[in-house]
Amino acid sequence: MSEKDILILAIESSCDETAASVVKNGRTILSNVISSQIELHKLYGGVVPEIASRKHIEKINQVIEEALEQAEVTLDDLDAIGVTYGPGLVGALLVGVAEAKAISYAKNLPLVGVHHIEGHVSANYIEHPDLEPPFMCLIVSGGHTHLVIVKDYGEFEILGRTRDDAAGEAFDKVARAIGLGYPGGPKIDKLSKEGNPDAIVFPKAKLENGPYDFSFSGVKSAVLNYINKCKMQGEEFDRADLAASFQKAVVDTLVEKAVKAAKEYHMDKLAIAGGVASNNTLRSAMEKACEREGIRFYHPSPVFCTDNAAMIGVAAYYEYKKGTRHGLDLNAVPNLRLGER
Ligand code: KG4
Ligand code: ZN
């Protein structure tokens, strides 16, 4: 390793994955360890915050040790510690933040707090060395739906966000209603391959103000009403058709708005990020629409779409380079806004 290499250990614990990663010079992932709690939360049909925190505290040291080992480095080789400090579940975030502070204090290392969404956006830098701001980015996860212009590293102009449910949340709720269990997104993705996306026409929200805002509660309610109506009339419905039709309604809206924004703001690059960005139908629809419009389309591999610490390490590197430093008074901020420091 040359003298100028910057090594960052990143920690992510905002929801139900305990994750640690070592990132070299912002774009090379030396390790990416993720301990998922999905099996545990499945029993309850969703993430139980108290259980998430307890599992994080149990796993975090082991996950960090593994990340260092796989990267073949020790704490003494590091230049900084990056950690997600919001948004997310407060008890879950606190585990990562306390751990990062302890390492920063013990090893006298700079501490860089990272916004979770900035992490998701930064996942796109990992496999696309050519990608640099400015570009348009659609972030679709279990907790967030944002359409932003990435003006520079860590600099965002928010064009739109969801007014109610996040895209991933709608996937999870519809999946639960048709008995697919948690997390619903990947299950709807899979089941919809056997269904007809044009079988049922679900409404797309028309919002008066805010052309780039989203709303998914309408389509979710329409799906629930459809299921209830079928039950009351004693009719069977095809779960695959329903999954495919719901997915189409969501994907069409996401693609339409993201591409329209890219054109309006003269962006020739469009990226997607967050758990829902691993959805196969969304990826291929985006790819097609971008090709038609002469826009370059970027997306991370699925493992970097859902929560991971590699993306936090990438974001931390660019923040570190800009001089962002947090003190040992860093706290978890469950509703941290994008662009806030
Ligand atoms: O980014 P993420 O791991 O966590 C948050 O920051 O929220 O996103 C998790 C969300 C869940 O709602 C999950 O159902 C959804 O991403 N998801 C998917 C797919 N894989 C994960 N949604 C649709 N299709 C998928 N293949
Ligand atoms: Zn996330």
Image (cartoon, grey):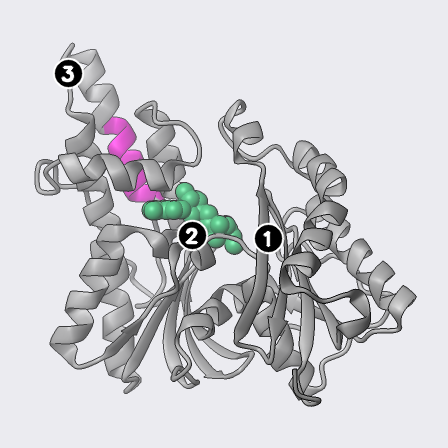
Determine whether, in the image, residue 284 is placed left or right of residue 66: left
Q: Which mark is residue 33?
A: 1
Mark 2 = which residue?
275
Mark 1 closeness class: few <14, some 14–19, many ≥20 residues within 10 Å: many
Q: Mark 3 or 1, which is nearer the eye?
A: 1
Residue 227 drawn above or below residue 35: above
Q: Is mark 2 within 8 Å of ligand 1?
A: yes
Residue 4 drawn above or below residue 254: below
* Precedes in sequence: disc 1 or disc 2: 1
Residue at (64, 64) in percent of width and height: 71
| Element under disc 2 | helix
* Precedes in sequence: disc 3 or disc 1: 1
Q: Amino acid at mark 3?
A: Glu
Q: Which residues are magenta?
A: 217-225
* Precedes in sequence: disc 3 or disc 2: 3
Q: Position of residue 58 (x, y in %)?
A: 75, 38
In which quarter of the view is residue 233 placed? top left
Q: Which mark is residue 104?
A: none
Foreground pick, 46 / 81: 81
Q: Mark 1 or 2, which is nearer the eye?
A: 1
Q: Amino acid at mark 1?
A: Val
Asked if the stretch drawn in magenta spans residue 220, the answer is yes
Asked if the stretch drawn in magenta spans residue 233, the answer is no
Q: Where the C terminus falls, by quadrant?
A: bottom right
Q: CA distance from mark 3 to mark 2?
A: 31 Å
Q: Which mark is residue 236?
A: 3
Q: Amino acid at mark 2?
A: Gly
Q: CA distance from mark 1 to mark 2?
A: 17 Å
Q: Position of residue 270 (x, y in %)?
A: 31, 75
Mark 2 closeness class: few <14, some 14–19, many ≥20 residues within 10 Å: many
